[in-house]
Each structure stands twice: as structure tokens, then as C-alpha cells.
């Protein structure tokens, strides 16, 4: 089982939302060090101040996870200044919340860059050192949106479908090495953070509380769970997609459960601006 006690934990998108909560909760569970990556310097300053006020060791780094050069340079700094992470949580993510027709080139590039390329780049930057050590746990925060279509989420869903396939394939590759290397893929429905402000919960699918899903994720890490799906009804999605004809799935799940209208009143938060190049 993966031990949070005494570990070095790195969380991307760790300045706000569940990224911030997972980092701070890891420290409360006696992680030795917390490394926080975020694109927003104000969020980094705030979470660092909060952790240090409680007497915890935290190392904040401003970085755009979609920038390959910045990711590699910052990973090199982390390894030199803090050490190789024991637990790497790929949490950074964005959503535009528009129809595909409304997406700009920048919207598409940012969403795929942060949600899909980001975890791959971050993982690749640290993976050689993790494999050489022979132990490590990678957590990829995907989404229930990676299991079904949804209007106003086309590019976001595409990014999470890709992340899901990559994460599960990575798990198999690392398991084949016969070492203590673990991958947990998380597929939550909507979480009550600013990222999904304005969404309406589908039928029988409550909006998740950040503190609750944080506890579930860290427990899944400690238990070396392969997949974490929340809430429970998300377990049914692969089955229903497999056995129902597409039009019937649209009618029963998409419209009957109000999934396809859940983003109609979405407001969310603005997409991030680029950060200065890491030296």
C-alpha cells in the first residue's frame, strides 16, 4: 500500500480547488513535503502561506503544465531542490463550457494542452527518476466526462477521454516492470468548485463536495486502487454505453437524467493566461 506518511507529494493545479485540498490534506496526513505547481502566482502564495502558518513544508512553483520546456525545467528544479516525488497528482485542468462552434483555436489548444498534454509532460519529466527508484504513485484526475458525450463539453470531454486511455495504458506499462509503481485514475462527476460554477446536477448524480472527493482520492491512493469513480452511479456509465443503442442512451441517460442539459447555465471561471518562461 502507498504510504502518504513521510512522503513527498506533488500536486499540479494545487493552488485552488481540490488540488489545494489534496495537498493540504496530504500534509495533515503527515506527508513530509508538499510540492505545488500552479499557473496562478496569487493562488500559490496563498496556499504556501496557509501551509507554512501550520508548520508544514511546502514548495510552490509557478508553471504552465502545457509548456514542455517549462515542465522539464521545473521538474529538474524540483528534483534538485526537493527530491523525486513519491506521489504525483496530475490535477490541473480547465473547461471552456462552450459549444464546439463557439470554441476558438486558443480554447482548444489550452484545453488539450492542460488537460491531456499536461499530465503526460509532467509524468514524463519525473518518470525516469521514479522508475529508477523503483517506487511511486501517479494519480491522474480524469472525469466522468471521459465516459460519455455532453453538449458544451466537446473539447473537455475529448481531453478527458484521451487522458483516461493514456492513464490506464500507463498503468499496464508500469505494472509490467514488476516494481512498486502504481497509477490511480479518477473519474468524478461535477465537483462543487469554481471550475464548474453554474452547472445543474443530473438526476441521481449529486454534485460532489470538494472535501469528500479529496478524502476519497487520498484513500484510493493509500489502497492502491486502479480506478476511482464518484459518485456511485458513474460505475454504470460504461455498462449503459455498452448495452444501449446510441439513440436510446441519448434518450434515457442524456435527456432522461438531464445530463445533456447540465451545462446549460455554466459560468465557470476564465481560462488561464500564459505564464512567463521558466529560466
Image (spheres, helix red, strand yellow):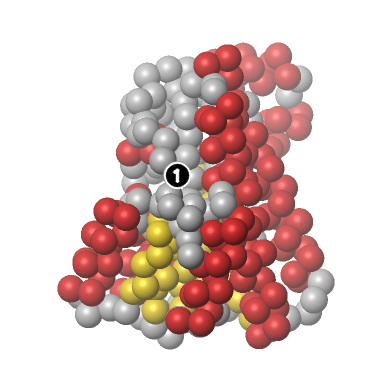
Q: Where is residue 20 in the image (x, y as percent from the top left)?
A: 34, 58
The residue under the point 22% across, 66% down is 50
Number of marks present in the image shown: 1
Q: Mark 1 points at which residue?
A: 274
Q: Is residue 151 visible?
A: no
Q: In this view, does 212 lie to the left or right of 160?
A: left
Q: Where is residue 86 in the image (x, y as percent from the top left)?
A: 54, 77
Kindly indicate the quadrant of the structure image that contains residue 235: top right
From this view, report whether residue 105 is shown above or below residue 73. above
Q: Label 1: how many residues lie within 10 Å, few (<14), some (14-19) or many (20+)?
A: few
The residue under the point 76% across, 29% down is 243
Q: In this view, does 114 lie to the left or right of 263?
A: right
From this view, report whether residue 130 is shown above or below residue 161. below
Q: Is residue 60 visible?
A: yes
The residue under the point 39% across, 79% down is 33
Q: Where is residue 158 in the image (x, y as percent from the top left)?
A: 64, 34
Kindly indicate the quadrant of the structure image that contains residue 41: bottom left
The residue lying furthest to the left in this view is 53
From this view, report whether residue 125 is shown above or below residue 147. below
Q: In this view, does 173 lie to the left or right of 163?
A: right
Q: Position of residue 199 (x, y in %)?
A: 38, 27
Q: Quadrant of the N terminus?
A: bottom right
**As rendered, which of 209 and 127 lies closer to the eye?**
127
Q: Is residue 94 left or right of residue 137?
A: left
**As rendered, which of 213 and 146 lies closer to the eye?**
146
The residue under the point 55% across, 67% down is 73
The residue lying furthest to the right in this view is 176
**As rendered, which of 193 and 256 lies closer to the eye?**
193
Amino acid at each position: 500500500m502507498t504510504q502518504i506518511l513521510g512522503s513527498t507529494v506533488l500536486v499540479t493545479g494545487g493552488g485552488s480547488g481540490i488540488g489545494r485540498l489534496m495537498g493540504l490534506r496530504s500534509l495533515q496526513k503527515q506527508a513530509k513535503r508538499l510540492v505545488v505547481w500552479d499557473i496562478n502566482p496569487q493562488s500559490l502564495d496563498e496556499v504556501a502561506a496557509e501551509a507554512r502558518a501550520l508548520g508544514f513544508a511546502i514548495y510552490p512553483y509557478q508553471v504552465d503544465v502545457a509548456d514542455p520546456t517549462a515542465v522539464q525545467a521545473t521538474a529538474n528544479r524540483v528534483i534538485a531542490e526537493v527530491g523525486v516525488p513519491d506521489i504525483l497528482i496530475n490535477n490541473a485542468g480547465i473547461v471552456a463550457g462552450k459549444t464546439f462552434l463557439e470554441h476558438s483555436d486558443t480554447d482548444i489548444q489550452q484545453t488539450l494542452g492542460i488537460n491531456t498534454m499536461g499530465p503526460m509532460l509532467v509524468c514524463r519529466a519525473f518518470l525516469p527518476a521514479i522508475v529508477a527508484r523503483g517506487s511511486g504513485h501517479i494519480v491522474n484526475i480524469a472525469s466522468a466526462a471521459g465516459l460519455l458525450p455532453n453538449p458544451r463539453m466537446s473539447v473537455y470531454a475529448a481531453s478527458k477521454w484521451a487522458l483516461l486511455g493514456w492513464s490506464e495504458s500507463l498503468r499496464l506499462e508500469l505494472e509490467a516492470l514488476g516494481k512498486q509503481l502504481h497509477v490511480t485514475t479518477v473519474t468524478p462527476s461535477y465537483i462543487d468548485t469554481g471550475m464548474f460554477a453554474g452547472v445543474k446536477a443530473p438526476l441521481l448524480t449529486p454534485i460532489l463536495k470538494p472535501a469528500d472527493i479529496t478524502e476519497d482520492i487520498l484513500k484510493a491512493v493509500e489502497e492502491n486502487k486502479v480506478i476511482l469513480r464518484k459518485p456511485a452511479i458513474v460505475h454504470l456509465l460504461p455498462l449503459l454505453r455498452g448495452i444501449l443503442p446510441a439513440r436510446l442512451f441519448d434518450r434515457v441517460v442524456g435527456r432522461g437524467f438531464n445530463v445533456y442539459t447540465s451545462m446549460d447555465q455554466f459560468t465557470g471561471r476564465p481560462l488561464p493566461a500564459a505564464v512567463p518562461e521558466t529560466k
